[in-house]
Image (cartoon, helix red, strand yellow):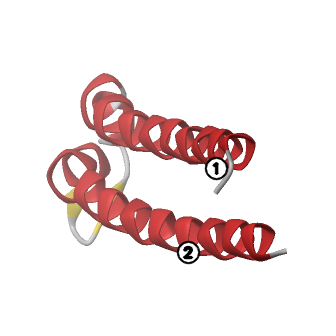
Amino acid sequence: MNKKLAEEYWEKNIKYLIILLSIWFTVSFGFGIILVEELNQFKIGGFKLGFWFAQQGSIYVFVALILVYILLMNKLDKKFNSKRSS
């Protein structure tokens, strides 16, 4: 892979990481700590929503973001492998 393609690949990879980690930070820190009192007014599965995000929600979101990252990187790898071949 030439240098230009490699730089473009890593630029997109870092962009994906920043977006996905920002989502995780918002869910885990924002919903689980900062907004917990506001979210506790609602319930999910019998538990207060703020508590749920702090205990379970951030973990579920993290696992979902890992799956999204896998899909994005597979797509990116296919795109750059086809560019490299041509």
Amino acid marked by disc 1:
Tyr
Q: SS for tag 1? A: helix
Q: Nearer the viewer, residue 72 or 42?
A: 72
Quadrant in the rendering for residue 60:
bottom left
Is 29 above or below relative to 83?
above
- Say whether residue 24 is left or right of residue 29: right
Of all residues shown, which one is farthest toward the front? Answer: 2
Counting every numbered tag in the picture gives: 2
What's the residue at 37%, 29% (across, down)? 30
**Disc 1: which residue:** 9
Picture coordinates of residue 82, whole percent (x, y) = 76, 76
Foreground tag (1 vs 2): 1
Residue of label 2 = 74
Q: Is residue 63 left or right of residue 26?
A: left
Q: Quadrant of the C terminus?
A: bottom right
Quarter containing the N terminus: bottom right
Residue at x 66% of width, y 41% of height: 3
**As drawn, is 9 to the left or to the right of 31?**
right
Q: Residues within 10 Å of mark 2 (few under 14, many from 20)?
A: few
